[in-house]
């Protein structure tokens, strides 16, 4: 193995430590802690784990955590009424509705009901538009966490060739926008891309966010490239990423492991976005 392992867990822990100091300073000046409301609908076990760890991390950073659990059978109107109350609540700086939602609820309707200035997930179309046009807003947590890891390792990204594999609204598209904002030459690849191996081979930066275990092969990676693996796939061998880690680690310059790479960054950035929201709303 030649690649440096990018320790997202350690980076996120240090980042959260610095945030806690800034949260304490905000709370002392504003006479209130920043508040994050998390809404969980139904009993999806993976979502329940995420929501629990978000609540724990929020409190550990010195913020207020407001958790709302609704049954899987809740009517869409009732969920929207809760979002309206959270939008109006001055103690709430950030609102996160955990996805996926049950099939009878239209996620787009729920996401667009959240006040864009409390949308710490950055999923509201207004925030997607702000990101695309270079305006201040909220950027989705996972891609922003990936960018922090990339800049920490590479410094200035200008002129680098970046390939993002995956075109979701949550990761692929905002990741591509962020890299474009750093003056990378950006390619977005996806399930219909022809000759994916050649596309990946020219990249100095590879961000894999497709949700297919070990799909990106080590032979595809340009020697010395930086590889960010967003995938979290449950397989018989346990959790694996979208990248064939052993193969890629023998050629890449640096690579994130799964677990312990990108995953811990998501919650750290969520806390950061909540603190940013509290500052904006206080000013
Ligand atoms: N489900 C999986 N990841 C996320 C996330 O980052 N935000 C929300 N709201 N739901 C998710």
Image: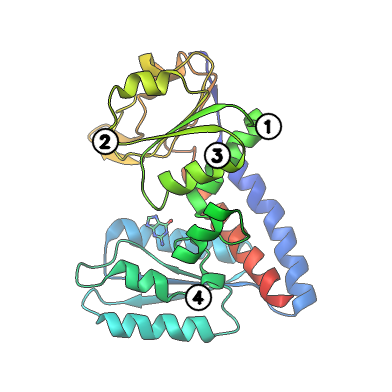
Q: Secondary structure at mark 4?
A: loop
Mark 1 and ligand 1: say if the CB distance to the nearest ligand atom is below 8 Å: no
Task: Name the residue beneath numbered marker 4.
Answer: 115
User: Is residue 75 visible in this depiction of the protein?
Assistant: yes
Counting residues from the N terminus, which is met first, the one under dot 4 or under dot 1?
4
Taking the image as shown, residue 209 lies to the left or right of residue 95, namely left
Q: CA distance from mark 1 to mark 2?
A: 30 Å
In terms of image quarters, where does ligand 1 lie? bottom left
Residue 264 x/y as whole percent: 51, 46
Q: Earlier in the sequence, mark 2 or mark 3?
A: 3
From mark 2 to mark 4, how far is it between C-alphas? 33 Å
Question: Mark 2 or 4 closer to N-term?
Answer: 4
Q: CA distance from mark 1 to mark 3?
A: 11 Å
Label 1, on which residue?
156
Q: Which mark is residue 191?
A: 2
Q: Which is nearer the N-term, disc 1 or disc 2?
A: 1
Q: Which mark is residue 210?
A: none
Residue 193, above or below 101: above
Assign the C terminus to one quadrant of the image: bottom right
Is the residue 183 above or below the residue 3 in the image? below
Pointer 3: what residue? Answer: 179
First in sequence: mark 1 vs mark 3: 1
**Who's the residue at 68% across and 52% down the image?**
17
| Mark 4 neighbour class, 10 Å CA radius: few under 14, some 14 to 19, many 20 or more | some
Q: How many marks?
A: 4
Could you say where residue 78 lies in the image, as x and y percent from the top left? 31, 85
């Amino acid at each position: 193995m030649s690649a440096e392992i990018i320790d997202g867990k350690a980076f996120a822990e240090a980042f959260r430590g610095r945030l806690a100091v800034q949260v304490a300073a905000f709370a002392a000046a504003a006479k209130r802690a920043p508040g994050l409301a998390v809404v969980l609908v139904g009993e999806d076990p993976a979502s329940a784990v995420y929501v629990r760890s978000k609540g724990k991390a929020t409190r550990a950073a010195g913020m207020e955590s407001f958790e709302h659990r609704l049954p899987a059978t809740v009517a869409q109107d009732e969920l929207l009424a809760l979002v309206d109350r959270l939008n109006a609540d001055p103690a709430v700086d950030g609102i996160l509705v955990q996805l996926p939602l049950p099939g009878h609820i239209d996620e787009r309707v729920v996401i667009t009901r959240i006040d864009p200035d409390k949308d710490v997930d950055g999923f509201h179309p207004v925030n997607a538009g702000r990101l695309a046009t270079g305006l201040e807003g909220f950027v989705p947590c996972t891609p922003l966490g990936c960018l922090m890891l990339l800049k920490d390792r590479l410094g200035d990204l200008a002129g680098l060739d970046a390939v993002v594999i995956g075109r979701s609204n949550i990761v692929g598209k905002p990741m591509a926008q962020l890299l474009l904002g750093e003056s990378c030459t950006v390619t977005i690849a996806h399930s219909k891309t022809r000759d994916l191996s050649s596309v990946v081979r020219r990249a100095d930066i590879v961000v894999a966010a497709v949700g297919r275990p070990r799909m990106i092969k080590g032979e595809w990676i340009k020697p010395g490239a930086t590889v960010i693996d967003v995938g979290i796939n449950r397989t018989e061998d346990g959790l694996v990423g979208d990248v064939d880690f052993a193969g890629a680690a023998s050629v890449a310059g640096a690579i994130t492991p799964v677990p312990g790479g990108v995953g811990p960054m998501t919650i750290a950035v969520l806390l950061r976005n909540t603190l940013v929201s509290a500052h904006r709303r206080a000013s």
